[in-house]
Amino acid sequence: MQIQTLFQYQSPLGVPIEIKKQTFAPAAGRPAKRISFVAGLHGDEWEGLYICHLLSRYLQDLEETHAESFVGEINIYPAANPQAVCDGTRLTPFFSVDANRSFGAGRSDSLPESVASDLFEDIRSSSDFAVDIHSSNQRLLELPQIRIVEEFDLSLTPLASECNVDIVWVHPMAGVFRSTLAYNLNKARVPALVVETGICLRIHPEFCRQVFHGLVRLMRHVGILKADDPLEFQTKKPRVVYPHEVGSLQAGKSGLFVHQMKLGQSVREGEKAGEIIDPIQGRVLEEIRFPFNGTLFTVCENPIAYEGAPLARAALDSPARK
């Protein structure tokens, strides 16, 4: 393994900030393909850091015991926004900038946009494939899943189906995606998957191991690692869902949401999901019931609910018509 410092810049307090990259390459010859794994663009999403740790440990052991397994090159960017990671914040400290909304604009006088431009160019020039790993926000707990913008469905879904996640969610394009790392890599013809798992400010080891196993499978599938790699993992095929196959449960009232849902649970229409209560008045404001049959892949973990807030998402058993 080679560790390289890609960029070093001074924070507003004068402390140097470094973005590092780990590289695993074949012992001899040119790499057949190259893949990059990126985590930590949002500093409060720690599941990706742990997944990168699992990948790095596995690949270091493989280098020592079965170096011939490396056919391609593997690049790991374990903390792409180290300043935010150290503070545990979604936005880059001092600048209040979302690092994953800073791509595609080119270089500028803004330090975050300048760093994003250089980071993007390094990933683009080092990759035939890429995986950007995220956790959910403070409200929602997610089953391991991959999200794909419809524009890239045909090229990305076969890759995502190798990754041992529970759900591959193909969703419509939205303007907010235009400035993300994965969207710009895909536009630059580097197939890039977005992993979403767990919840921010937490680490779920079982979810991380599941995704790690899937990423090893992906590397074998695309010819980065030999298929006869000695360590075998049991992996699953995900369910691929499209917009009409996803059901959403929302709050009708504002209050404290006390739920009785479990991630991965199969639910039936009319089944009780929980209650929204008013703890000041001691009243039940709303009894929440599922309007669909399906399997939950998103569950609200933050009990403060506002009218219209998402409480759960499910892969529907009987999808609505398109």
Image (tube, grey):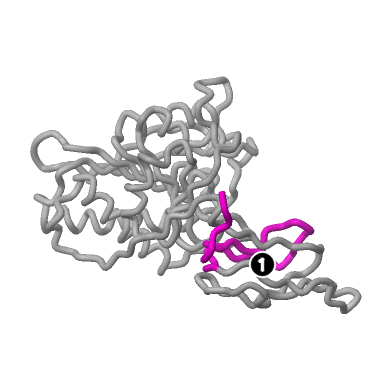
Where is residue 18 shown, x and y percent of the image?
43, 38
Q: Is residue 301 magenta?
A: yes
- Residue 159: give x, y in percent of width and height: 32, 47
- Which structural element holds mark 1? loop
Query: Which residue position is annotated with label 1?
Result: 291
> Which of 192/31 is in front?
192
Residue 296 or 219: which is nearer the viewer? 296
Q: Position of residue 207 (x, y in %)?
A: 42, 65
Q: Is residue 131 left or right of residue 98?
A: left
287 displayed left or right of 297: right
Name, please, the residue furthest toward the front: 321
Judge whether 16 appears above or below 316 on screen: above
Q: Residue at x 55, y 50 (%)?
A: 243
Q: Is residue 126 above or below residue 224?
A: above
300 left or right of 59? right
Packing grade of label 1 (10 A; few <14, some 14-19, many >=20) is: some
Q: Is residue 10 above or below residue 271?
A: above
In which quadrant of the rendered view does residue 304 lie? bottom right
Q: Residue at x 48, y 63 (%)?
A: 143
For the residue pair 30 and 16, the one nearer the viewer reads as 30
- Please tell me which residue is depicted at 59% across the width and 49% down the height of the picture: 89
Callout 1 amino acid: Pro
Which stretch did the figure color magenta? Answer: 294-322
Residue 20 seen: no
The answer to whether one can see residue 29 in this image is yes
Which residue corresponds to the image point at 36% horizontal and 37% vertical from the top-left? Answer: 191
On whether residue 2 falls in the magenta region, the answer is no
